[in-house]
Image (spheres, coloured by chain):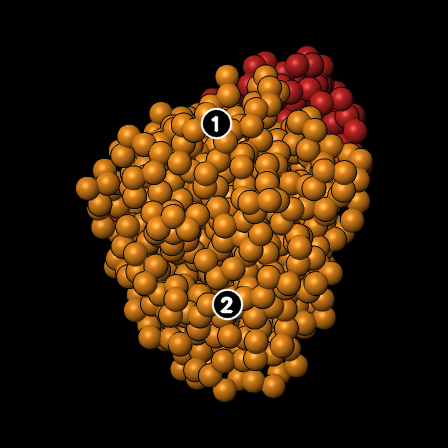
């Protein structure tokens, strides 16, 4: 049965962005249908292994190798385990064109809540510089907004989400509305003091994390209990997820309908009125397709999936998308470059260990091409995420001496990894496969995305500077590694439907609204003309809340 | 995504080798459920099974806490090699067991499983020092299996080590002197 005029808005995707869209639109009085291609996961009830020790989890929580090889050969790069298996996409059932184009890890969720259930939760504002660099360097597309346009929306979402962190007054990393930070351990304080002294201008700060350090009783959420089992789902609601935060708010309005197992293939479009008229949905279980009429659509399916849906919304008889009058759709795809790790031993303090399993760690904000460190052979910059910890002593020999020898801890060790900004390149693109389709008839995504000279130089610098800083700070046995840089591996893929002031050069306008359809908003990572070097999810939230506010005002004014 | 601490610490991801399998396989829509039942096929002969059991206990013996047999490490090893590991992962284990068996019959005139604990320790030491064919490779992998099975078992997690289900707080300068056991993760 086709629904007719039952909903004021359809939200496609229920992850970080979709959840926020559903919350904001329902709270503003709209009847909303939220669709997700994945299975239903209810807060608490469906967190099967929440709190379980490893011996209660199948295969001791180690993903069986044959299953990785057959079904999770991409998800394995995204930390899938038996305790969170149902939150992940099955790579056999839902493929992309793995064997063609350039190597790309498209790591996808497979459940309602999307990546909000399994994300790393590091939460940073982007900086004024991040919105200005493209224009100044004449690279990629110019941002149609600046930091000041987004700042009030960062305030708004942070107060609701609960972001822990410390105020630092750094121009390259604006402060959020913080709850108190999760403490540094004694060894991290030691590294901080020495690193900031021996490498002037560089900072080592508390992580900024969407794990709460204060309760939010009005939302039924408790602060972090330091189990560090976040990716299994947290019944305390201590970290931001759709299930814990935005879905309850949207449901409380009585205006939300949520459909899981609902695969969106494309948007229906009327060129005469330049409006999206419907959303075509395939039931993942029955494969029945239907077109649901739409007055307003928020496309929040994830950067690459939203781009795929846009590209698959084609002018009949052509391969061209209704939404690609600019020729930029599917282009300027980016991901943070990483897989440079540096570590070393911290002398002393062996009278202390950590009690509790802490999520997050510490952060060294970007220092290159800001604050006087310019002219170093590459553009933009990188930051490091790290932590100090003590590992149990390794085995020596065998028998009782080995067993009892493992009853202690090794020295404090500090490890960190760099995340660097990737520039927007026109020919870093995704496209629809000309003839291969998935089980729903949707053309497979093909990736032709590579890191270039600027990104590779940046990672070389991150490795050298990381070693230098840790040695200067007094760490011993400092070492590093640089592994293969595969786009998608950071799971911060963005771009594909960038925003811009000029409809000839961009897919969306400054309100995340399609140039070619006033009733279509794309508020996830697809819209970014550049990607900073810090984690993006908090920025998705701010953009989504801002777009929802604008869309409802336009709707009420009769402009949509 | 999720906690990158392991990756950041430079610990090699547990699974990294298998990428980009062909997508042309027949697409069953059944999402695979992890098999936790008995081994789907026998990895060991009865004699090998007895030897695995005996050697597991020599690697992690019963002391003031239970050892590998009590923690059902031998069953874990056979299940893992039958269903959770790559098919080729059992080869160095079977080869090493064979080398130990041959040496036991030569030196002690008995099956290795029936040798005394001291004789079994001597055989394991020969393997550890690579004085048996494939010995060091076997020792490293077998010891890894025993350690993994033991420290992920209920006995390993709650008796040999201490598990905090809900720590409730984080103290980054907790006195080591107050710790009697290593915390399980």
Asked if disc 1 and disc 2 are in contact, CB closer than 8 Å, the reply is no
x and y percentages locating residue A549 in the rendered image: 35, 52
Residue A220 seen in this snapshot: yes
Q: Looking at the image, which is closer to me, A453 or A484?
A: A453
What color does chain B have in the rendering?
red
Chain letter for the part of the structure drawn in orange:
A
Q: Report the disc number at residue A144.
A: 2
| Tag 1 residue | A260
Element carrying mark 2: loop
Residue at 59 percent across and 17 percent down: it is: A286
Question: Residue B127's image quarter?
Answer: top right
| Rendered location of residue B171, percent (x, y) | 28, 54
User: Residue A200's spot in the image, x, y percent?
Assistant: 44, 84
Name the residue furthest left.
A217
**Residue at image point 54% right, 66% down:** A501
What chain letter is assigned to the residue under label 2?
A
Q: Nearer the viewer, residue A367 or A49?
A: A367
CA–CA distance in space, label 1 to label 2: 35 Å
Which residue: 59% across, 40% down?
A: A269
Q: Quadrant of residue A47?
A: top left
């Amino acid at each position: 049965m086709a629904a007719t005029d039952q909903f004021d808005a359809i939200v496609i995707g229920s992850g970080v962005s979709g959840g926020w869209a559903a919350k904001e639109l329902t709270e503003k009085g709209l009847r909303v249908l939220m669709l997700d291609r994945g299975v239903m996961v209810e807060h608490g009830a469906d967190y099967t292994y929440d709190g379980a020790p490893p011996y209660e989890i199948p295969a001791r929580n180690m993903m069986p190798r044959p299953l990785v090889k057959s079904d999770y050969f991409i998800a394995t790069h995204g930390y899938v385990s038996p305790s969170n298996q149902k939150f992940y996409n099955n790579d056999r059932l839902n493929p992309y064109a793995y064997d063609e184009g350039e190597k790309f890890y498209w790591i996808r969720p497979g459940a309602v809540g999307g990546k909000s259930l399994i994300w790393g939760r590091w939460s940073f504002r982007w900086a004024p510089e991040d919105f200005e660099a493209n224009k100044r360097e004449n690279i990629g597309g110019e941002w149609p907004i600046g930091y000041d346009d987004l700042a009030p929306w960062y305030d708004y979402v942070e107060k609701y989400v609960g972001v822990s962190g410390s105020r630092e007054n750094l121009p390259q990393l604006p402060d959020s509305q913080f709850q108190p930070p999760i403490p540094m351990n004694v060894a991290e304080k030691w590294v901080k003091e020495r690193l900031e002294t021996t490498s002037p201008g560089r900072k080592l700060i508390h992580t900024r994390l969407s794990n709460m350090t204060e309760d939010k009783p009005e939302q039924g959420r408790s602060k972090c209990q330091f189990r560090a089992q976040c990716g299994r789902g947290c019944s305390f609601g201590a970290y931001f997820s759709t299930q814990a935060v935005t879905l309850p708010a949207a449901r409380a309005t009585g205006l939300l309908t949520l459909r899981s197992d609902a695969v969106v293939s494309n948007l229906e479009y009327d060129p005469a009125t330049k409006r999206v008229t419907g959303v075509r949905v395939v039931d993942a279980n029955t494969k029945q397709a239907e077109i649901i009429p739409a007055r307003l659509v928020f496309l929040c399916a994830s950067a690459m999936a939203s781009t795929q849906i846009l590209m698959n919304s084609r002018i009949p008889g052509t391969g061209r998308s209704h939404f690609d009058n600019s020729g930029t759709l599917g282009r300027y795809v980016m991901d943070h470059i990483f897989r440079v790790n540096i570590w070393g031993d911290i002398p002393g303090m062996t009278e202390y260990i950590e009690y509790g399993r802490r999520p997050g760690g510490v952060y060294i904000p970007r220092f290159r091409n800001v604050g006087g460190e310019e002219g170093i052979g590459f553009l933009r910059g990188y930051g490091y995420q790290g932590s100090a910890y003590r590992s149990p002593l390794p085995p020596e020999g065998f028998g009782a001496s080995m067993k009892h020898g493992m009853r202690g801890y090794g020295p404090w060790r500090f490890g960190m990894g760099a995340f660097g900004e990737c520039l927007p390149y026109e020919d870093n693109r995704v496209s629809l496969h000309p003839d291969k389709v998935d089980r729903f008839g949707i053309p497979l995504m093909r990736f032709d995305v590579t890191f270039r000279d600027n990104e590779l130089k940046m990672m070389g610098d991150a490795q050298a500077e990381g070693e230098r800083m840790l040695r200067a700070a007094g760490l011993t046995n400092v070492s590093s590694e640089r592994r293969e840089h595969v786009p998608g591996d950071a799971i911060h893929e963005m771009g594909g439907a960038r925003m811009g002031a000029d409809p000839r050069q961009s897919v969306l306008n400054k309100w995340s609204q399609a140039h070619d359809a006033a009733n279509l908003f794309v508020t996830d990572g697809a819209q970014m003309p550049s990607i900073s070097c810090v984690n993006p999810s908090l920025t998705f939230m701010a953009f989504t809340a801002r777009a929802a506010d604008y869309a409802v005002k336009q709707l009420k004014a009769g402009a949509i | 995504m999720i906690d990158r601490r392991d990756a950041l610490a430079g610990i090699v991801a547990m699974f990294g080798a298998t990428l980009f399998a062909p997508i042309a396989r027949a697409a069953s829509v059944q999402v695979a459920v992890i098999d936790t039942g008995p081994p789907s096929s026998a990895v060991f002969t009865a004699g090998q099974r007895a030897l695995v059991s005996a050697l597991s206990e020599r690697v992690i013996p019963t002391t003031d806490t239970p050892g590998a047999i009590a923690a059902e490490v031998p069953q874990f090893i056979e299940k893992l090699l039958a269903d959770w590991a790559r098919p080729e992962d059992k080869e160095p284990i079977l080869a090493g067991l064979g080398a130990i068996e041959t040496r036991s019959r030569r030196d002690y005139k008995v099956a290795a499983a029936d040798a005394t604990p001291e004789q079994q320790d001597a055989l394991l030491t020969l393997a550890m020092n690579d004085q048996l064919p494939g010995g060091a490779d076997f020792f490293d992998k077998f010891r890894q299996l025993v350690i993994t099975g033991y420290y992920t078992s209920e006995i390993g997690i709650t008796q040999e080590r201490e598990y905090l289900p809900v720590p409730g707080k984080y103290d980054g300068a907790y006195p080591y002197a107050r710790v009697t056991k290593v915390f399980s993760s």
